[in-house]
Image (spheres, rainbow, N blue to C red):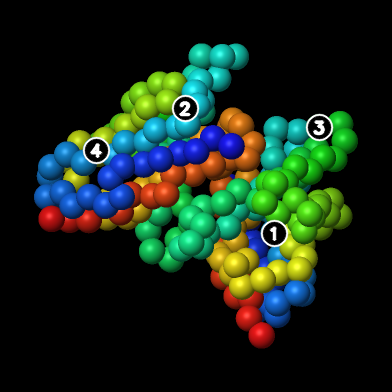
Amino acid sequence: QVQLQQSGPGLVKPSQTLSLTCAISGDSVSSDSATWNWIRQSPSRGLEWLGRTFYRSKWSSEYALSVKSRLIISPDTSKNQFSLQLSSVTPEDTAIYYCVRKTVFLDYWGQGALVTVSS
Amino acid sequence: DVVMTQFPDSLAVSLGERATINCKSSQSIFFSSNNKNCLAWLQQKPGQPPKVLIYWASTRESGVPDRFSGSGSATDFTLTISSLQAEDVAVYFCHQYCLTPFTFGQGTKLEIK
């Protein structure tokens, strides 16, 4: 059974960097049949895919254009986890953030983490 | 980006009656390599992450009751709940998962009449 456990601060100040981690059990971040995604949800933007990282002979990451200049998604193979770093945050980045595994579809979701951007 | 549009935004149905939610994509999401549509239906209850009910437009995920069914192809899709139960009160989203950025409908809130 795959489980994704999210961790990270719930409050971030404007202009700072939002950092979240997703620990994986029951699968490997290096799997060649899965991608590891971050999705956020807010009342104003709905469900929004932010990006993903995956291993296919080498590591790759892919990002939504709306956040591409501010976002890094990276794996940590030693801890079997992946992380999100979103820089220069504004109140518009306030949302529930989910880490999600995708094989065929988005099949396993983390529990979600509410992150508020406020001074 | 593929824009997913759902209708209606909200729906109230009596217990035991049929509920139908529609979804339209701005371009075809038919995946020619396996002749399938890259469309999933998600259910979200308060305080929980979304859960996949249907993928490939019509394949029910393991453990999902058979009162849930999906249909449609190319740009037009439907989720049907044949006989609404109290536990089906939730927000439902359609979602395309083959073209990045993956995109979602705005959600349909289903309530009991």
Q: What residue type is disc 3 on?
A: Arg
**Sequence-first disc among 4 and 2:** 4
Q: Residues within 10 Å of mark 4 (few under 14, many from 20)?
A: some
User: In the rendered picture of this protein, how many numbered marks are placed on residues?
Assistant: 4
Q: What residue type is disc 1 on?
A: Cys
Mark 3 vs 4: CB contact within 8 A: no
How far across and how far down the image is residue B67, in percent? 25, 36
Residue A76 in view (yes/no): yes
Q: Chain of mark 1?
A: A
Residue B2 placement: quadrant:
top right
Which residue does the numbered mark 1 point to in the structure image? Answer: A22
How far across and how far down the image is residue B107, in percent? 38, 50
Which residue does the numbered mark 2 point to in the structure image? Answer: B56
Residue lying at 20% horizontally and 36% vertically, measured from the top left: B82
Secondary structure type for disc 4: strand
3D distance between C-alphas at marks 1 and 3: 20 Å
Q: Horizontally, is B5 left or right of A83 in the view? A: left
Which residue does the numbered mark 3 point to in the structure image? Answer: A56
Which residue does the numbered mark 4 point to in the structure image? Answer: B20
- Nearer the observer, disc 3 or disc 4? 4
How far across and how far down the image is residue A27, in percent? 69, 45
On the same chain: label 1 and label 4? no
Q: Chain of mark 2?
A: B
**Sequence-first disc among 1 and 3:** 1
